[in-house]
Image (spheres, rainbow, N blue to C red):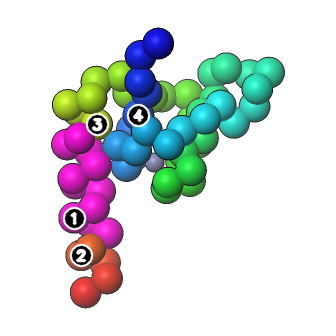
Amino acid sequence: MKRKFCPNCGSDNIKWALPQNWSVWECYNCGYTGAVVIEDEELAKEISEKYEKDRNKKKE
Ligand SMILES: [Zn+2]
């Protein structure tokens, strides 16, 4: 099975929001819910780096 990643933060800590509804995913890292997930690990890495940068920016 392929790994899946959150399109918002790049985390792979995502699960089906509803077990009876496979089309909705929930990210436990950023709270994203939606039908879109990423299966490209390279892309997920880029998103993750951008997400961390934005988060650090907000802290300053
Ligand atoms: Zn996320």
Question: Where does the magenta region start and end?
Answer: 45-55
The kind of secondary structure element at disc 1 is: helix
Q: Earlier in the sequence, mark 3 or mark 4?
A: 4
The quarter of the image holding the C terminus is: bottom left
Distance, label 2 to label 4, CA atoms, is 23 Å
Query: Is residue 13 shown left or right of residue 22?
Result: left
User: Does the magenta segment cover residue 36?
Assistant: no
Q: Say which mark, if any, is on residue 15.
A: none
Distance, label 2 to label 3, CA atoms, is 20 Å
- Circle 1 residue: 53
For the residues bearing labels 1 and 2, Cβ distance under 8 angstroms: yes
Residue sitting at 63 percent across and 21 percent down? 23
Query: Considering only vertical position in the picture, is 52 above or below 15?
Result: below
Query: Is residue 41 shown left or right of residue 19?
Result: left
The kind of secondary structure element at disc 4 is: loop
Q: Is mark 1 within 8 Å of ligand 1?
A: no
**Where on the picture, by quarter, is residue 50?**
bottom left
Extreme residue in the top direction: 1
Report crowding for label 3: few under 14, some 14 to 19, many 20 or more residues within 10 A (C-alpha). many
User: Percent x, y for residue 49?
Assistant: 21, 53
- Circle 3 residue: 44
For the residues bearing labels 1 and 3, Cβ distance under 8 angstroms: no
The kind of secondary structure element at disc 3 is: helix
Mark 1 is on which residue type? Lys
For the residues bearing labels 3 and 4, Cβ distance under 8 angstroms: yes
Q: Earlier in the sequence, mark 2 or mark 3?
A: 3
Camera-side mark, 2 or 4: 4
Mark 4 is on which residue type? Phe
Distance, label 1 to label 2, CA atoms, is 6 Å
